[in-house]
Image (cartoon, grey):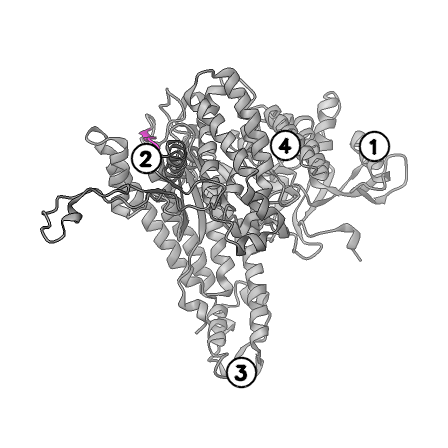
Amino acid sequence: MLESEKEPFNWGFEAGFLRSPVNPRMLLLNRTPEIDCAGDENATGNASAWNLVSIANDLLRVDLSSLFNEIGDHFRERANQRFYIDLQNAIRQSSTAPHHAQQASMDWAAEPGHDDQLDPDDPDQESAQAELNEAEIEVNLQKQKESDLDFFAPIIDKVITRHAHGEISGMARYLLESVCRQCVMNITAIPDYRYYSCWMDNNAIECNEINRLYRAVITTSGQLNKQEIASLFSSYLKLESNDMSINATNGKTDLTAPVPYDHDNPRYNFPKVKSQIETACVCTNTELFRALLIVFYQECLELAPLLKNTEAPSLLAQNEEFFPAAIKTSDPRQFRLFDEQLPAIIRFGEAFACAAKKHLPGNETAQKLVEHLNDIKRMNSAPFMQAFRKNYLEAMRENQIFANGDFHTHAELNDQENLNRLVGLQAVISKAGELYFTEKEWSFASLYARILHELLLCGIMPMSCQTCGSLFFPTGPNSKYCDRYNKETKLYCNPRYNTKKHLGRKSPRDVALNMQRKADTAYKKGLTDCAHYFERLGNFVLDGLGPTYQASDLISDELYATWLSIVNQPNCRTEIKRPDRIGFPYSVMWYGVVRDGNRYVRVEFPGVEYPALFERLSRLAERPQSKCTLDFKGPGERPYSSWHIKLYKLLEIIAQINSADQMAKPIPLLGIDEPERVSTDLTVQDTWNTPDACVCSTGMIYDLSFTVYTKGYDPEKRD
């Protein structure tokens, strides 16, 4: 048996929680590079901060039990293909005897309809078996993992959409995708989907039980306060509440106890001359630095709502990503990564503190914020930091990690100044331990329970929706309704979402403005390519497809909101030199779903039918750096012609032409017009690794013929 098969599967998802009564955060400390930063070697240190209330509301709108049961069923179907059982047996026998595996390729064996052909007990197939060594088996497992990731990606996406009652954010979708894909990522260690199917079933059962327990516990609000309710909830699930890696350690206390008079040794009866109480701080410099950052971060989050009409919230949104990265890497073994975050944090802190002093004079939290910022500056220029920057290895050898000389680690009771300072430092460390908690989650159910528990600790209680009775966390003082959407009635629980004339669809302008802010941030970081992408994406949303999608009656409000959310997902990360997760995407709508428009489409039409489109594509094809190429041009002035062009660019051009000249014949907008005339193969694995010339969609709408290829297709590499 493989050593890995002796170990239980562990999600290993590390999350931190910053407790705040007004603005709690969940910090993701080890986002999976294979899933959200594929192909980028610098993404391993990726960390981010999410609004905990938003995440909780998203997850409460998902039927988690049904979702995980369905994913488990898909894993069971995959396990029923005998190939996995045969391969697992071959691996187990590899260390003791020659092992055999099917000669057929991995992809062929995984295809439906071949289950009955892979029977190792059939003597007729004995000649078809070939001996594989351990290296070959490992290579095959790796290929199977890559194939399965592509196979399950669209399935997981559709299952999440099906069991979500209303729109959920990209953050919540990421969590659900991650827990499903991590099972596939682990297939090289435990190559049996039956195991992961059971694991999913357990998540389904436990999430359902957690919901029942949570609803029961909050009914005690008339008897217990919020902290007591949190303690009651955690007692059933054995959840820890304190981060033991940050603590304040006091010195030895030895108060005098009554003792009998000693006749034999009278001198022992006299008072002791030394102090009975000692104070000491045994934390390291980096632990103290980390505690200061946590407390400072929480104070910024607490003040942000009070400064909503100033530049402070925007500053926090642009620079918040540095705090999770610094808190995560404050371990001295990751000193360089930690040190890289400090200049940006200090610059942000100075600007934020300036705004707080200006607009909140006399505010106690604002005053503490300034004090803690000064402490951060002092520590940043302290001798131990200089020693680490100069020679990291030597500083570690000389134990510079501990506060010997830079900050007092011991204070006598008669030294009031140093005593006050030491107690103040211990207070910061103690507060940080109460504000911040981190743990590795072994399953999604454990993370789900932790999220609900943390909100109770922050004093944030859920309430029942007046429409459907489901639990949700209020986001305003007058919240009465959750954001659920009923697919049967096609109505939201919140009545104002159902009145288009009152609310309407959100303008794409807000997303475009956010793109400009991201571009400005990228320019400041020196990421020119990234900045140019955000500028182009902003124009794509505001002047391209955004207004057309907003005005179209063929698009549901839910799909439109999903498109805006996905377009707004990419963020500029200094570690990876490009927007995270999916490179440089241009998301478009494609008949009920949102897809990346970074794929080629072959479009053919008579020039006389759509002259404006003919002229635009012809000019674009003449540019040397253009991604548009002319494939065929018939005789005449505006003949029947064909081009290869990126899908998002074609849709943008069509939308601009239709918007500019509303008197001319409208050009069909692919992706939303005439779905009955379009054929889409949902079984095609649409990834960058898909073989060339793989068609995923084709059709003809009013003389406009088109063929959409998978993202791996490149017309320049055609034979």
Which tag is nearer the camera, tag 3 or tag 2? 2
Question: Label 4, label 1: how many angstroms apart (C-alpha)?
Answer: 34 Å
Secondary structure at numbered mark 3: helix
Among the 4 quarters of the image, the one containing residue 648: top right
The residue carrying mark 2 is 456
Lateral position of residue 197 relative to residue 527, left or right: left
Towards the viewer: 115 or 150? 150
Lateral position of residue 697 relative to residue 561, left or right: right
Lateral position of residue 358 relative to residue 646, left or right: left
Among the 4 quarters of the image, the one containing residue 507: top right
Could you tell which of marks 3 and 2 lies nearer the N-terminus? 3
Secondary structure at numbered mark 1: helix
The residue carrying mark 3 is 126
Q: Is residue 109 visible?
A: yes
Q: Is residue 198 above or below residue 322?
A: below
Mark 1, residues whose alpha carbon is within 10 Å: few (<14), some, or many (≥20)?
few
Could you tell which of marks 4 and 1 lies nearer the N-terminus? 4
Q: Is residue 545 visible?
A: no
Which amino acid lies under the numbered mark 1 shown in the image of this protein? Glu
Question: Label 2, label 1: how many angstroms apart (C-alpha)?
Answer: 61 Å
Could you tell which of marks 3 and 1 lies nearer the N-terminus? 3
Question: Label 3, label 2: how many angstroms apart (C-alpha)?
Answer: 62 Å
Magenta run includes residue 460 = yes
Asked if labels 4 and 3 touch by Cβ distance under 8 angstroms, the answer is no
Give the extent of the magenta segment.
457-464
Question: Label 4, label 2: how many angstroms apart (C-alpha)?
Answer: 34 Å
Residue 615 image label: 1
Q: Is residue 503 above or below residue 232?
A: above
The x, y position of residue 217, in whole percent, is 24, 37
Towards the viewer: 53 or 147? 53
